[in-house]
Image (cartoon, rainbow, N blue to C red):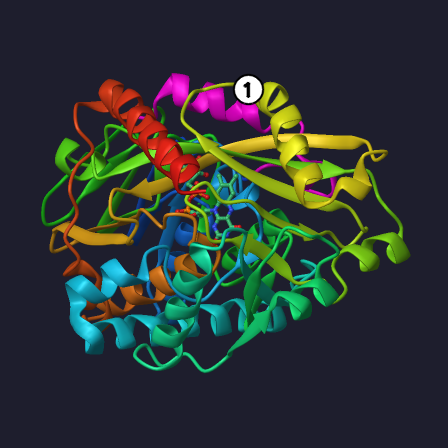
C-alpha cells in the first residue's frame, strides 16, 4: 500500500512545479482500474522505469498493464533536475563489488541508457527540450584530484570515451562563476524537461498497446505461478509483476527489500525567464552542471531561459517553500549576478537512494521483479532498467544478473525509522564536508 504521509508530503512538494506549469497534460487522466484484467506483465508505477519496462515488454510481444497510484510523471520522473547522465552515483563502489570487467559492462549499459533516451525522443517525436552536454565541476581544492581520478578511471578502466578535462580558466569561459576550480566535460550526457519526456513515454507506451491506469494504487500482490495484483477496485492476473514504485512504494515488496532504499527530499527552484542573451552569458554552451560534493548543487538553463537550480538534499520534511530561500542563496553563491532575479517556482520530490548509491535491481520470485535505488541517476538508468528486466522476462538474464549481483545493506529500522536514521547519516556527511572545506 502506498504510504499516505509520504504521498501527501510529495504532493505538497510538487505544488509549485515549473514542470507541471510548462506541460500540457492530456485532458483526461488514464482510467482507474475497476475490473479484473489478464496480462502477461503487470507493471507497478508509471514513471520512467515503469514506462520503460512497458515499452520494452511490448517490443517483445508481451501484453502489459501499468498501474499508477496517481498518474504518469507524478513521482520523481516528473520533478527531477533533468540531468541525463551516463554512469552511476558511486562508480568506485560499483567497481569494488563487480570488479573492473563488471564495472566496464555496467558502464556500457549506462551509456546504452543515454543512447536509449535519445532514440526514444527521436522515435516517438518527444518534444522535451533535449540539450547535449554535461559538466561535473569541483568547488574545493581537495576535490579536484578526486574529479581527475574519476575521469581517468571512467576513460580507461570503465571504457567511457566522451570525457575531457577543463582547467579553471576553461571552466570560466563556460560558466560565468568564480566558484569552480576544474571540471570534466561529458559530450554524450545532457539534459531535458523530465515531465515532457515522461508524458512522451506514457503516450508511446499507450500507442504501443500497453494499458495504463491512473489513481489505481496497488494494495497487495498475491504471489505464485500466476500473481494477482490488487487495487482498491480491481485486479490484474498476470504472469510477471515488476515494481517500479520508487521511493513512495510501501507495503508491496517485502520489508527487507523496501528497507534498502530511503526517500531523500531534494528541491529545485526556477527563476523568472532571463532572456536568451542573459542566460547564454551564464552558461555559454548550455550544459547541465553538477558539482562533486556530497551535498551537491545541480543546475541548468531551461528552454525558456530560466535557471533551474537544485540541491540541498534533506530528509527533514521541510516544505519546498521553506527551502527555496536556501536554494536561492546557494544559487547566488554560484551566480551573485542574479541577485535582482525573481524565483518563480520551487518544488521537490523524493530521490530513491540506496546506502551504497548503486542501483538495486532484483527478483523476489522468478516472476516478480523490482527496480529501485537509482540514487540520483535515474533519468538515463531507468531506461536501461526497463530493458534489462524485459530481457530477463524474455529469458535473457545476462544484464539483469550483472546488476542483481550488487549487494545492498538495509537502512536501519522499519519504515518509520528509516527517515530519522537517514537524517542523522546525512547530518554526519554534512559535518564531514564542512570540516573538509
Ligand atoms: C528533485 C529530484 C531531482 C532529481 N534529479 C535527477 C537528475 O537530475 N538526474 C537523474 O538522473 N536523476 C534525478 N533524480 C532521480 C530520478 O528522478 C529518479 O531516479 C527516477 O525518476 C526514478 O524513476 P521511477 O520510475 O523509478 O520512479 P518515479 O518517477 O518516482 O515513479 C514511481 C511511480 O510509482 C507510483 N507508485 C508508488 N507506489 C505505488 C503503488 N502502491 N501502486 C501504484 N503505483 C505506485 C507513483 O505514483 C509514481 O508515479 C532526481 C529526483 C528528484 C526527486
Q: In the image, is residue 113 above or below residue 220?
A: below
Residue 35, percent from left and from top: 37, 34
Residue in the picture at 58% in, 29% down: 14
Quarter of the rendered image showing ligand 1: top left
Examine the rendering and report whether any part of residue 35 can be seen.
Answer: no
Front-most of residues 304 and 388: 304
Q: In the image, is residue 322 above or below residue 75?
A: above
Per the image, label 1 sits on a secondary structure element best described as loop
Residue in the picture at 58% in, 52% down: 82
Using the rendered view, name the quadrant where residue 133 is placed.
bottom right
Figure label count? 1
Residue 348, percent from left and from top: 55, 32
Examine the rendering and report whether any part of residue 181 can be seen.
Answer: yes
Residue in the picture at 36% in, 81% down: 159
Q: Report which residue position mark 1 lands on.
A: 319
Front-most of residues 412 and 211: 412
Q: Which quarter of the figure is the N terminus placed in?
A: top left
Q: Is 60 positioned to the left or the right of 128 in the image?
A: left
Q: Is 4 positioned to the left or the right of 165 in the image?
A: left
Residue 351 lies in magenta, yes or no? no
Residue 209, percent from left and from top: 47, 59
Q: Residues within 10 Å of mark 1 (few under 14, many from 20)?
A: some
Front-most of residues 352 and 145: 145
Using the rendered view, name the quadrant where residue 64 is placed.
bottom left
- Confirm if mark 1 falls within 8 A of ligand 1: no
Front-most of residues 244 and 115: 115
Using the rendered view, name the quadrant where residue 231 is placed.
top left
The stretch in magenta equals: 1-29
Residue 12 lies in magenta, yes or no? yes
Residue in the picture at 38% in, 30% down: 217
Amino acid at each position: 500500500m502506498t504510504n499516505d504521509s509520504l504521498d501527501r508530503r510529495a504532493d505538497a512538494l510538487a505544488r509549485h512545479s515549473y514542470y507541471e506549469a510548462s506541460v500540457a497534460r492530456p485532458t483526461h487522466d488514464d482510467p482507474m482500474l475497476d475490473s479484473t484484467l489478464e496480462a502477461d506483465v503487470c507493471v507497478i508505477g508509471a514513471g520512467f522505469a515503469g514506462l520503460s519496462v512497458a515499452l520494452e515488454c511490448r517490443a517483445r510481444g508481451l501484453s502489459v498493464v501499468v498501474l499508477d497510484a496517481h498518474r504518469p510523471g507524478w513521482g520523481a520522473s516528473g520533478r527531477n533536475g533533468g540531468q541525463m547522465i551516463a554512469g552511476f552515483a558511486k562508480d568506485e563502489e560499483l567497481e569494488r563489488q563487480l570488479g573492473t570487467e563488471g564495472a566496464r559492462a555496467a558502464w556500457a549499459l549506462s551509456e546504452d541508457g543515454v543512447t536509449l533516451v535519445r532514440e526514444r525522443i527521436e522515435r516517438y517525436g518527444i518534444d522535451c527540450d533535449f540539450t547535449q552536454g554535461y559538466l561535473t565541476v569541483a568547488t574545493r581544492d581537495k576535490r579536484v584530484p578526486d574529479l581527475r581520478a574519476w575521469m581517468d578511471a571512467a576513460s580507461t578502466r570503465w571504457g567511457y570515451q566522451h570525457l575531457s578535462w577543463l582547467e579553471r580558466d576553461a571552466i570560466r569561459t563556460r560558466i560565468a562563476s568564480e566558484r569552480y576550480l576544474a571540471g570534466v566535460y561529458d559530450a554524450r550526457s545532457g539534459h531535458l524537461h523530465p515531465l515532457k519526456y515522461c508524458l512522451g513515454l506514457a503516450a508511446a507506451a499507450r500507442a504501443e498497446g500497453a494499458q495504463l491506469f491512473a489513481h489505481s494504487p496497488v494494495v497487495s500482490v498475491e504471489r505464485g505461478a500466476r500473481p494477482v495484483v490488487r487495487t482498491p477496485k480491481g485486479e490484474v492476473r498476470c504472469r510477471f509483476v515488476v515494481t517500479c514504485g520508487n521511493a513512495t512504494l510501501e507495503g508491496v515488496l517485502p520489508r527487507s527489500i523496501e528497507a534498502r532504499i530511503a526517500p531523500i527530499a531534494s528541491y529545485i527552484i526556477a527563476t523568472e525567464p532571463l532572456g536568451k542573451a542573459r542566460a547564454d552569458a551564464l552558461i555559454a554552451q548550455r550544459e547541465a552542471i553538477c558539482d562533486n560534493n556530497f551535498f551537491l548543487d545541480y543546475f541548468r538553463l531551461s528552454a525558456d531561459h530560466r535557471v533551474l537550480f537544485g540541491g540541498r538534499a534533506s530528509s527533514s520534511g521541510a516544505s519546498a517553500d521553506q527551502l527555496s530561500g536556501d536554494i536561492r542563496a546557494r544559487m547566488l553563491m554560484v551566480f551573485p549576478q542574479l541577485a535582482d532575479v525573481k524565483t518563480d517556482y520551487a518544488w521537490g520530490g523524493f530521490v530513491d537512494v540506496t546506502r551504497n548509491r548503486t542501483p538495486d535491481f532484483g527478483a523476489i520470485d522468478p516472476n516478480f521483479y523490482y527496480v529501485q535505488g537509482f540514487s540520483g541517476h535515474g533519468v538515463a538508468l531507468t531506461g536501461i532498467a526497463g530493458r534489462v528486466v524485459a530481457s530477463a522476462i524474455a529469458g535473457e538474464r545476462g544484464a539483469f544478473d550483472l546488476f542483481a549481483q550488487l549487494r545492498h545493506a538495509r537502512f536501519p529500522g522499519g519504515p518509520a525509522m528509516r527517515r530519522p536514521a537517514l537524517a542523522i547519516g546525512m547530518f554526519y556527511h554534512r559535518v564531514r564536508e564542512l570540516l573538509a572545506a
